[in-house]
Image (tube, coloured by chain):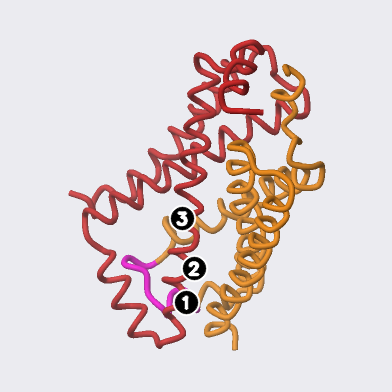
Amino acid sequence: MRQEVLARNAGGMWPWLGQRVTAVLVMVTIMVHLVLTHLFASIPLTFDDIGDRLASGAVLVNDVVLLFAVLFHGLNGVRMVVLDWGLSGSGRRVFDGVLWLVGIAASIYGIWALWVWVS
Amino acid sequence: MSAKDRETANVGAGLWKGLGMWAWVLFRVSGLILVGYLFVHVWVISQGRAGAETLDDLFDFFHNPVLVFLELMLVAAVLYHALNGVRIVLMDLGIGIRQHKTVFWACMLVAAVTLAVFTWQAFPYIF
């Protein structure tokens, strides 16, 4: 029982590793994102100001990596919470499928949203 | 494992108590708040598709003391989650397991100093 509680990878090895990898990615990219949008942006924020920043390839890559990494990290986090309350068997597989669908849809939606400034 | 068993097991392992427990509870709560915000944020930014004016109107609407204050609380949630996350990643690497309380407060110090910078920036728009 002690073993089971201490195993942080009870939800699977890949989700566990993915959560750590995306954690590090998000820490770096969100820092860039927050410093640029809170400390160096126009106040209040404007459409044109976002465009100026996204015109830089580095900022665009930063924000896209942040979008993908944070979606995985957030949805996998929700999965960890739900699994802790107890969800197994087919219910768990359906739930995993739903989370992947939400993540992929939100990724596409996010890119579509940013496309206004890129194209 | 039922909730009851889980709780007992946590107590047995010495995890479900004290600072470590509260750090974990706050980690989960902040995480769930941030997931909620993530989807709101993506939706707000997507309003740029409707034109510059639509998005700028939204930004003007957000530019009031209450929402700037809430935004600052969001930054606090991000900083807590990120810095407690640093501690967890370090522990996964086998660093600072016995000194986890010291590492926790060191991380919180970094979070507090960073939050102070953002508060300095937000202050004129809240008061």
Chain bearing tag 2 is: B
Q: Which chain is red?
A: B
Which numbered disc, 3 or 1, marks the residue closer to the eye?
Answer: 3
Q: Do callouts 2 and 3 mark residues in contact (Cβ within 8 Å)?
A: no
Which numbered disc, 2 or 3, marks the residue closer to the eye?
Answer: 3
Residue receiving disc 3: B36
Residue sitting at the far left? B127
Mark 3, secondary structure of its residue: helix
Q: Which mark is residue B42?
A: 2
Residue B75: give x, y in percent of width and height: 43, 47
Name the foreground residue: A15 vs A10.
Answer: A10
Q: Which residues are magenta?
A: A42-51
Amino acid bearing label 1: Ser
In this rendering, the answer to whether A15 lies above or below A34 is above
Q: Residue at x 63, y 75 (%)?
A: A108
Residue B93: give x, y in percent of width and height: 78, 28
Quarter-wise, where is residue B116 in the image?
top left
Is residue B116 a member of the stretch shown in magenta?
A: no
Quarter-wise, where is residue A71 in the image?
bottom right
Residue receiving disc 1: B46
Total labels drawn: 3
Chain bearing tag 3 is: B
Name the foreground residue: B114 vs B63.
Answer: B63
Q: Do callouts 3 and 1 mark residues in contact (Cβ within 8 Å)?
A: no
Is residue A47 a member of the stretch shown in magenta?
A: yes
Q: Residue at x 56, y 17 (%)?
A: B16
Q: Do callouts 2 and 1 mark residues in contact (Cβ within 8 Å)?
A: yes
**Local crowd size for mark 2, using a 10 Å CA cut-off: few (<14), some (14–19), many (≥20):** some
Mark 2, secondary structure of its residue: helix
In this rendering, the answer to whether B125 lies above or below B24 is below
